[in-house]
Image (tube, coloured by chain):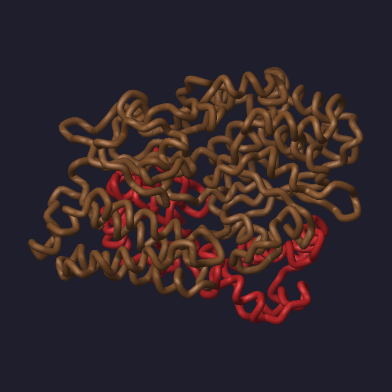
């Protein structure tokens, strides 16, 4: 795994150092001092206020305000309370959490301890996707080190907080990244999302009050406790403070991970940091935040990467996974790959999603074969529109949005297939 | 009994970590597969007894998750990511070449039981596409020749 080029640098600054994943190496660079401060000098309310003031938003895709989420946990100790670290990173185009797990496991555990103090949770379950065997091993080793050193256990870092961290491996199901699908899976069931309310803060893992945060979200917490809310707000935009780790993939010169402030312009990420298109090619479109987020054409890349700006272009930040497509690429094939994925991963609970994802894929394939008609484009939009906002979880929306985005900006690709009766992009990637 | 005493001891250790027994079902399925390669009907019945469930409740979990198998598998799994970032970087061609090389299609196992070939959705290694997974290990930035050599080297 390569070193992460960074501008802001607080999350990934030491990721090039091999000993940073060990307890000794992490401590040498000031590790666990923020947790010590939170556990011994701060009240739960103070931590929640601090994280709220910093304006940290969840980095798992939905972008909910973290401090507010922590404040939803019931006070008092009549029931056990839990934290869940969502390490099920499965959004296509997203690969930052793998790096954070492999290179900065103690940074995550430190964030967990801070959140545990803030919420009164006695245990954290890290739910990690089954394919991440190596990151899970790295994290398990870090947890063992912490237990042996008294950082986790009955008196964490010598404070009154008792906390332990359990790692649970998933087994290959995208839907388990949805927080209530995750909770079901954690309980040993099929990962089918729950109806809400009740929300996890009332009825979460094993029926107990639970807060679910993403790997990266936890990783920010130590830096906020150490440096303060004003420092954190020195990065990013007014409405989206802090940095994030953007993953850039696809047809660019330097695919990789880049830690940058939120609000960094998308064209800066694609053309400067990632080096722009391959020789002799031109950028055609960019998916800005993981595959569920609607695509933008090259003419609209002058947008700051923060949800308040992306929303004006009818897309969102998602997980910050930037996928770059160049002028060889057939957008109908892109549609085929995307709709196949969602058809394959739908959990099957809701009719709109179970049937809709299949229809979208079938129609998309028909158009790619050259057997589509112009009416199919209306059917695609009709089906997508009837999936949106109609289901138990946001998966159906995530399946509908990219189709809408492709038709909004690249309708001519679709029409060309239909009028020529075949795919007009001979150079495009193989399907 | 299909589940060995050693696996059973590890399952019991996993159960102790969760507030409710069933929380250890996914870990237990991983452990049984480690021992037997797939979840046999007998193993599912034994797991059902351990977890106070009906066998169908174990089997529906097995069928829901891609990484649990309800039929015999090859000694090694070779899974090629065919999601978007990998497709853009030639993973479909890579998979096609491996299919020809091994004489099987994705989803099938070689006659000698050596390799089960599969396609996989995003593995979270998009910057190093194309990516394939051999059992629990990722191999990144592969070309067709390197992938063939890798597969040929599997016991």
The residue located at (64%, 33%) in the rendering is A219
Q: In the image, residue B102 lies at what x, y percent?
A: 32, 62
Task: Return the residue nearer the eye: A37 or A293.
Answer: A293
Task: Return the residue nearer the eye: A70 or A417.
Answer: A70
Task: Return the residue nearer the eye: A115 or B121.
Answer: A115
Q: In which quarter of the image is residue A216?
A: top right
Q: Chain A: what color?
A: brown
The residue located at (79%, 58%) in the rendering is A208
Q: In the image, residue A121 lies at what x, y percent?
A: 81, 45
The residue located at (23%, 33%) in the rendering is A278
Q: Which residue lies furthest to the front in this view?
A: A312
**Can you say whether B150 is above or below A174 in the image?**
above
**Can you say whether A134 is above or below B65 in the image?**
above
Q: Quadrant of residue A298?
A: top left
Q: Residue furthest left?
A: A420
The residue located at (71%, 48%) in the rendering is A211
Relative to A113, A184 lies left or right: left
Relative to A403, A116 lies left or right: right
Q: In the image, residue A206 lies at what x, y percent?
A: 76, 61
Relative to B88, A11 lies left or right: right
Q: Determine if residue A145 is in view.
A: no
Task: Return the residue nearer the eye: B120 or A83.
Answer: A83
Q: In the image, residue B141 lies at what x, y percent?
A: 36, 40
Instruction: Supply the letter of whichever chain is red.
Output: B
Q: Determine if residue A133 is in view.
A: yes
């Amino acid at each position: 795994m390569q070193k992460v080029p960074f501008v802001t640098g607080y999350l990934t600054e030491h990721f090039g150092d091999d000993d940073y994943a060990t307890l000794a190496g992490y401590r040498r660079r000031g590790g666990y001092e923020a947790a010590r401060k939170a556990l011994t000098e701060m009240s739960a309310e103070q931590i929640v206020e601090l994280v709220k003031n910093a304006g940290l938003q969840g980095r798992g895709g939905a972008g909910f305000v973290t401090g507010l989420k922590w404040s939803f946990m019931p006070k008092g100790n009549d029931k056990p309370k839990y934290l869940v670290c969502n390490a099920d990173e499965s959004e296509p185009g997203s690969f930052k959490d793998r790096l954070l797990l492999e290179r900065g496991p103690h940074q995550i555990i430190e964030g967990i301890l801070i959140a545990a103090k803030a919420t009164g949770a006695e245990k954290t379950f890290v739910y990690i996707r089954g394919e991440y065997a190596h990151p899970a091993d790295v994290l398990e080793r870090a947890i063992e080190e912490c237990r042996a050193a008294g950082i986790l256990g009955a008196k964490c870092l010598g404070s009154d907080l008792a906390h332990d961290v359990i790692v649970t491996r998933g087994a290959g199901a995208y839907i388990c990244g949805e927080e209530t699908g995750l909770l079901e899976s954690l309980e040993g069931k099929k990962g089918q999302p729950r109806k809400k309310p009740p929300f996890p803060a009332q009825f979460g893992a094993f029926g107990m009050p639970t807060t679910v945060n993403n790997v990266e979200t936890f990783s920010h917490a130590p830096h906020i406790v150490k440096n303060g809310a004003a420092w954190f707000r020195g990065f990013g935009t007014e409405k989206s403070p802090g940095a994030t780790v953007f993953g850039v993939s696809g047809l660019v010169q330097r695919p990789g991970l880049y830690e940058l402030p939120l609000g960094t312009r998308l064209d800066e990420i694609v053309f400067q940091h990632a080096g722009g298109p391959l020789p002799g090619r031109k950028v055609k479109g960019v998916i800005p935040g993981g595959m569920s987020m609607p695509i933008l054409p090259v003419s609209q890349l002058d947008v700051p990467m923060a949800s308040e700006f992306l929303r004006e272009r009818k897309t969102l930040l998602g997980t910050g996974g930037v996928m770059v497509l160049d002028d060889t690429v057939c957008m109908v094939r892109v549609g085929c790959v995307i709709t196949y994925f969602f058809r394959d991963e739908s959990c099957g609970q809701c009719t709109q999603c179970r049937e809709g994802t299949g229809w979208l894929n079938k129609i998309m394939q028909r158009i790619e074969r050259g057997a589509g008609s112009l009416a199919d484009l209306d059917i695609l939009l009709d089906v997508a529109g009837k999936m949106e906002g109609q289901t138990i979880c946001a998966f159906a929306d995530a399946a509908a949005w990219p189709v809408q985005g492709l038709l909004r900006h690249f309708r001519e690709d679709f029409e060309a297939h239909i009028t020529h009766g075949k795919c007009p992009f001979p150079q495009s990637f193989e399907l | 009994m299909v589940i060995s005493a050693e696996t059973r001891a590890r399952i019991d250790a996993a159960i102790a970590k969760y507030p409710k027994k069933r929380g250890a079902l996914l870990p237990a399925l991983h452990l049984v597969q480690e021992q037997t390669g797939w979840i046999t009907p007998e193993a599912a019945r034994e797991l059902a007894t351990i977890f106070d469930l009906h066998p169908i409740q174990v089997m529906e979990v097995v069928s829901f998750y891609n990484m649990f198998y309800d039929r015999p598998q090859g000694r090694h799994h070779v899974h090629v990511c065919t999601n978007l970032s990998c497709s853009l970087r030639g993973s479909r061609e890579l998979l096609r070449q491996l299919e020809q090389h091994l004489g099987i299609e994705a989803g099938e196992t070689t006659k000698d039981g050596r390799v089960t070939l599969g396609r996989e959705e995003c593995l979270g290694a998009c910057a190093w596409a194309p990516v394939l997974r051999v059992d629990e290990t990722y191999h990144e930035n592969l070309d067709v020749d390197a992938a063939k050599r890798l597969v040929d080297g599997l016991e």
